[in-house]
């Protein structure tokens, strides 16, 4: 549930490139106005309006015909580095070759240090180029906006806190299980020889197996929901989480089935038929998981192919 990675952002951009460019182009056409080239207050007001409507807009500024910033330190600059000469920046280089609305391809912003898009339009009066009104946008924020993910991201900190508390509780249980296995291990050597000596290691293995299953569960939750980015709109992310959870369950069930089978083979209260059924249940879980992964991957491939054809 971490922030979008650069790879995820670029993938989403290519999936929705047309919609993103159309949105930015429409904003550029709506914001372009000659007074913004010379009035810093009007520029600041326009930036405030844009931010209220489109939270992904990071800065709004004006360039003259040579690509120099007219209002240096214009709206949205804040503590970010402000470049007065933009004649070598992606927007101006593209705008010199295009008289219409310009939307750049993604690039790494020197101001925000993140993936960015710039969009703007030339301002002309009586056919004379006066300059350009340009705005910069964070690509990750645009993706969140288009996917309807903005509101959910506001609760992300709370979600992480809850998952962190759950992981802490699970890790505490793992500690108790390891302590119990250590006690059993100590009792194994301190109790001396006995008729049931060959059965005592089973208790240790049971505690360790449960500890392994709980630890793997806690580790999966920590990685999937706290540390790593999880794209809730992509089926592969959900499939990966379910696969990891089921893998932890499979390991625990398989080991417990083997223990029950060994005890039945030793004739110490074990039910051989129950052990066989448990092993068959583990095999069925594995087959079901494999079928789920295969069908999920096929479904996602079909869905992505349909999106590419529509795009």
Image: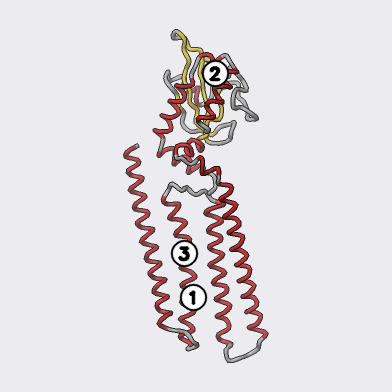
At 60% from the left and 21% from the top, the residue drawn is 84
| Looking at the image, residue 37 lies above or below residue 150 | above
| Looking at the image, residue 174 lies above or below residue 310 | below
Of pointers 2 and 1, the one earlier in the residue sequence: 2
For label 3, the residue is: 247
For label 2, the residue is: 63
Q: CA distance from mark 3 to mark 2?
A: 57 Å
Rendered location of residue 216, percent (x, y): 54, 63
Label 1: few (<14), some (14–19) or many (≥20) C-alpha neighbours in 10 Å: many
For label 1, the residue is: 256
| Looking at the image, residue 249 lies above or below residue 108 | below
Q: Secondary structure at mark 3?
A: helix
Q: Which mark is residue 93?
A: none
At 44% from the left and 84% from the top, the residue drawn is 271
Of pointers 3 and 2, the one earlier in the residue sequence: 2
Q: CA distance from mark 2 to mark 1?
A: 71 Å
Q: How are the colours assigned in the image?
A: secondary structure
At 55% from the left and 42% from the top, the residue drawn is 154
Q: CA distance from mark 3 to mark 1?
A: 14 Å
Rendered location of residue 264, percent (x, y): 46, 85
At 37% from the left and 53% from the top, the residue drawn is 297
Q: Nearer the viewer, residue 294 or 107?
A: 294
Rendered location of residue 74, percent (x, y): 60, 22
- Image quadrant holding the C terminus, namely top left
Of pointers 3 and 1, the one earlier in the residue sequence: 3
Is 285 positioned to the left or the right of 161 in the image? left
Is 105 positioned to the left or the right of 180 in the image? left
Label 3: few (<14), some (14–19) or many (≥20) C-alpha neighbours in 10 Å: some
User: Which image quadrant for residue 166?
Assistant: bottom right
Rendered location of residue 285, percent (x, y): 40, 67
């Amino acid at each position: 549930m971490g922030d979008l990675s650069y790879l995820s952002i670029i993938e989403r951009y290519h999936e929705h490139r047309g919609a993103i460019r159309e949105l930015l182009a429409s904003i550029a056409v709506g914001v372009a106005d000659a007074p913004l080239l010379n009035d810093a207050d009007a520029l600041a007001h326009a930036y405030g309006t844009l931010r209220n409507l489109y939270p992904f807009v990071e800065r709004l500024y004006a360039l003259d015909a040579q690509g120099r910033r007219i209002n240096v330190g214009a709206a949205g600059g804040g503590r970010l580095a402000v470049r007065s000469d933009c004649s070598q920046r992606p927007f101006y280089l593209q705008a010199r070759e295009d008289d219409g609305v310009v939307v750049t391809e993604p690039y790494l912003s020197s101001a925000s240090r993140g993936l960015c898009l710039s969009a703007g339009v030339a301002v002309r009066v009586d056919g004379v180029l006066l300059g350009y009104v340009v705005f910069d946008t964070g690509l990750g924020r645009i993706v969140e906006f288009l996917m309807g993910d903005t509101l959910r991201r506001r609760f992300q900190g709370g979600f992480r806190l809850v998952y962190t508390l759950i992981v802490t509780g699970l890790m505490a249980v793992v500690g108790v299980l390891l302590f119990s296995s250590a006690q059993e291990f100590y009792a194994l050597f301190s109790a001396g020889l006995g008729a049931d000596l060959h059965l005592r290691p089973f208790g240790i293995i049971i505690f360790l197996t449960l500890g392994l299953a709980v630890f793997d569960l806690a580790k999966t939750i920590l990685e999937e929901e706290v540390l790593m980015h999880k794209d809730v709109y992509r089926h592969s992310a959900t499939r990966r989480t379910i696969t990891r959870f089921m893998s932890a369950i499979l390991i625990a069930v398989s080991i417990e089935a083997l223990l029950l089978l060994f005890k039945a083979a030793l004739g110490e209260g074990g039910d051989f038929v129950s052990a066989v059924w448990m092993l068959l249940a583990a095999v069925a879980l594995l087959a079901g998981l494999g079928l789920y992964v295969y069908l999920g991957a096929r479904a996602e491939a079909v869905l992505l192919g349909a999106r590419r054809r529509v795009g």
